[in-house]
Structures are given as C-alpha cells and as structure tokens.
Image: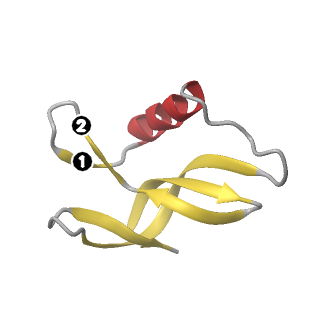
Amino acid sequence: MQAIVLVFFLNGAPIEFMGHYESANGSWQRMQVQNCLKVKRQLKRHGWSQPVTGSARYSCEMRNVTYGKSYDGKEIVVSIH
C-alpha cells in the first residue's frame, strides 16, 4: 500500500520514518502532504540542523509501506519499501 511518510535520511540511507501523527484533537491520523510539510517545518524551526560530517535530510515522500499495530494498538507504518 502507498502512503505519504516523513523520512529521515543520513548519508543517503533512510534511517527513520513517520507515517502517522496525533492531530490537534488527540486522534491518530495517517500522514498527508500538508501534515508532513508542517512537521518538517517544525523540525527546522526547533533546532534540527545539518550534522558537521555527512549529509542528513528530511523528505516527505510517497512510499510503499507496511502497516502494523503499535504497543498500544494504534495503526502505524512498520516498514517502508
């Protein structure tokens, strides 16, 4: 299944990803383009910066994903392909 995910790349390799977020009313939502870009902007505003060595970046991408359940039963993206 395809979904929008926020992916953290370090030296060109995907290290971490996020496919869901908690909305303002507290509900668990799948990531959409506008939410992904909002989270990415917030990361930059609140101190995320490039490392001294290597390259790092965040990217909002449409990826093939596998869904699963978190420890508290919420649907999450467990892997990206």
The dot on residue 21 is none
* Left or right relative to 14: residue 73: left
* Left or right relative to 8: residue 37: left
Name the kind of residue labelled 2 in the image: Ser
Residue 30 drawn at (x, y percent):
29, 51
Residue on which the image places disc 1: 29
Q: Is residue 59 above or below residue 66?
A: above
Q: Secondary structure at mark 2?
A: loop
Per the model, the C-alpha gap separating discs 1 and 2 is 7 Å
Name the kind of residue labelled 1 in the image: Gln
Q: Residue at x 44, y 73 (%)?
A: 79
Within 10 Å of disc 2 (Cα), the crowding (few <14, some 14-19, many 20+) is few
Q: Residue at x 53, y 35 (%)?
A: 43
Residue on which the image places disc 2: 23
Q: Secondary structure at mark 1?
A: strand
Residue 4 drawn at (x, y percent):
44, 53
| Quadrant location, the N terminus | bottom left
Q: Residue at x 53, y 37 (%)?
A: 40
Q: Is residue 64 above or below residue 37?
A: below
- Which of the 4 image quarters holds residue 12? bottom right
Q: Is residue 1 visible?
A: no
Q: Tell me if label 1 and label 2 are in contact, CB under 8 Å.
A: yes
